[in-house]
Amino acid sequence: MLGLALLTILAIVAAEALHRHIRLPRASGHMLVGALASPLALRLLDRTELDPWKPLLDLAIAVLVFELGTRIRPAWLKDNPWFALTCVLEGALAGIVVFGFTLWLGAPPLAAALSATVAMSTSPVITMAVLHESRSRGQVTERLLMMTAINSVMAVFALKVWRVAAAAQGSDLFAAVTSALFVLCGSLLLGAIVALVLELVGRRVRDTSAMPVLQMAMIIAGSMLAVQWTLSPLLVLLVAGMVARTRMRHGLTVEPRLGSAGAALGVVLFLCLGVLMTLDGLVQLWPMVLGILLARLVGKGIAVFALARPSGLGWRQAAGLTIAMQPMSSLAVLLAADTFNWASQLPGVEQSLLQALLAATTLMQVFGPVISTVALRKVARETPLD
Amino acid sequence: MPLAAFNSSQPLTLGVELELQLLSTHDYDLAPQAEDLLRVLERHTGAWDVKPEITRSMIEIGTSIQTSHGSLLAELHDLRRQLAEGARKLNIVIAGGGTHPYQHWSEQRIFPAERFHYISELYGYLAKQFTVFGQHVHVGCEDGDKALWLLHALSRYVPHFIALSGSSPFVQGVDTGFDSARLNSVFAFPLSGRAPFVLGWEAFGAYFDKMASTGVVESMKDFYWDIRPKPEYGTIELRVCDTPLSVDRAAALACYLQCVCRYLREERPVEPTEDDYLVYTFNRFQACRFGLEGDIVDPKTKQRQKLRDDILRTLARIDEHALDLKALDASALIRESLFAGNDARALRERRGVVRGLPAVVEWAASRWMG
């Protein structure tokens, strides 16, 4: 426990120094310190030591996902059907292209489908961290938020389908289908209930300093209940954020990261993501890793560019958006797992493909904030520093 | 560059320009998305025009040349519909109002165009503080002499337009107490205020040449006067109005100006003199500060009365002209608003009903978007 706490302090100082000198996004700095302490380098911490921290990290993710939910306006999809189509298509195409590529490499369909699922989503935590730090505002920023939310939800759905498909090979198909439906409906319902309770109780503490505390408490409750009932915390918190914003309108003020407590949680989260990084076998697997990353880039890029003009986006912005969406995470999978060693819980997945997938995720996690920041600052030109 | 020749245009034709706010649907703060909206509107159907403005959260729209209230209003409604549709596509909304109630001027970004960068370099932070939103109305004149005569004859009525259009009570999060706080930003510019009292176009050309020879100005665009001639268009341009919260009021204000101009041209109730300007800044201040409740001093009779009463009397005098110009609906709306109050009052009342300024801005946007 003490080790991680000390490491957190070190991460804050180091990330700040790196940010000042080479403008490295702080999230990347935190992850680098984590990676240095991990078995990859100095072996100060072992991955299994993080398991007791998982509830705290789930909470850190929940805070960012809730905030993401409050930032998006679902009615936009109705106002701009071309954009709605882009959202669905980019997630789907990223998945399809990666599926095709891994299948072509000779992976079994089930394993290829899993990599497709992971490839679909943009990391919500990296997106939020980058937006907090760069303070970007504009069309690409707005679209990045919406697309991150949608492709994350799609990844959750896809993972459920994958589990059903995986179960279909066994004998408990019925159980898998009902479990998937239970998780999806239950998550939506719990999310809505969390938001409604927040609205109801929030009336009593409106415009006071108790509001962020109440928000945090509701997020803890939602997150804990989701885990206890084996629902999807990501879906629960995203729906909670969206419903709370729609219901409470201007009555809901969400501070970035829900204030300093959320910011501290964020540091621990990125540090732990750093510790969890794995590049095992990268030397042998690099063509596969590169292939997965390129396939994903192509899939997302095709959708964004093909529908850029009808949906009202310029070419330069389309490029910015495609790049900004590259940060990858295993959150959809991670949040559904009981421990960080989720890979071992997935039956029937070939080890080398899984390794390549983990390495690709690692690379897109650590470089994600840099890539996304450059896309917003230099390509889309939406940060105040231009 | 010498002063351009005054292009003749059909007298009393109208053109309306409105500077509009682009807002985020998340926090209702200004959204730097002018380029996006301009792109979406590239292929709009309509004779109207849409252009960038100094910062990236503003756009300016301009109507085609109009002769009557009905056609002007129809064009403004069509323009509003297409603009609102484009904005929704981008997840932003559009609002009127002379100022944004809580934007931070330092966060505004200059639109990437040569002239705006030049203004930004020259005026420094003033350029970003110029993130204010006005309505400009052009009135056609047959020649330069008549344009200058009308410009000075109109000076007495400038407070009417300030008070009727006042829609900028809030600045940087606080109620300034002014109905039009926007004009305070305009007055900060060195070449703001009123045009010099020159009645002939030739003499005006000589004045312009003298100014240009000092290197202080390069074109008419460098003057931020309340009313200025626009020789390229063959118009005079009234620039004191805040952008109203709705296009209906914008059209009514333009047609009220058209009626006053016709009244002045045809009845010639007064001849403008330099002394008219003795009370000009006092009257203008009263209109900015107190709106329709302010006082106005008649430069000829030296009588002081409430602006509301002065506008009422003017409405009575121009009635026949409103009839001839098919602007009775416009003058009825102006008369109505004398009692209902201007948009500044509506914004203040709204603030009393809802929680916080973002909700006030959302309401203002819903009024503009229709």
Image (cartoon, rainbow, N blue to C red):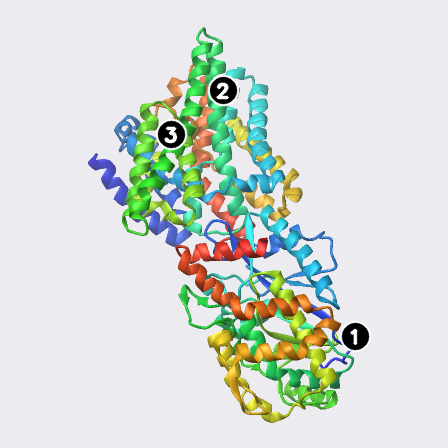
Residue B164 seen anywhere in this rendered image of the structure: yes
Q: Residue at x 51, y 47 (%)?
A: A141
Residue type at numbered disc 1: Gln
Please report the residue visible at 50 percent of the width from the left and 24 percent of the height from the top: A158
For marks 2 and 3, give the one nearer the viewer.
3
In this picture, residue B191 sits left or right of residue B289: right
| Residue B63 x/y as whole percent | 70, 63
A131 up-or-down from B162: above or below:
above
Q: Earlier in the sequence, mark 2 or mark 3?
A: 2
User: What label does residue B10 carry, if any?
Assistant: 1
Residue, x 79% and y 78% (percent of image)? Answer: B8
Q: Which mark is residue A190?
A: 3
- Amino acid under label 2? Val
Say yes or no: labels 2 and 3 on the same chain: yes
**Structural crowding at the residue carrying mark 1, measured as other residues with C-alpha within 10 Å and reported as few (<14), some (14–19) or many (≥20):** some
| Tag count | 3
Helix, strand or loop under label 2: helix
Q: Nearer the viewer, residue A33 or A111?
A: A111
Q: Chain of mark 1?
A: B
Visible residue check, residue B32: no
Which chain is home to disc 3?
Answer: A
Q: A235 or A202, which is in the foreground?
A: A202
**Mark 2 — residue?**
A161
State the residue at coordinates (44%, 24%): A184
The CA distance from mark 2 to mark 3 is 21 Å
Which chain does the numbered disc 2 sit on?
A: A
Secondary structure category for the residue under label 3: helix
Q: Nearer the viewer, residue B155 or B49?
A: B155
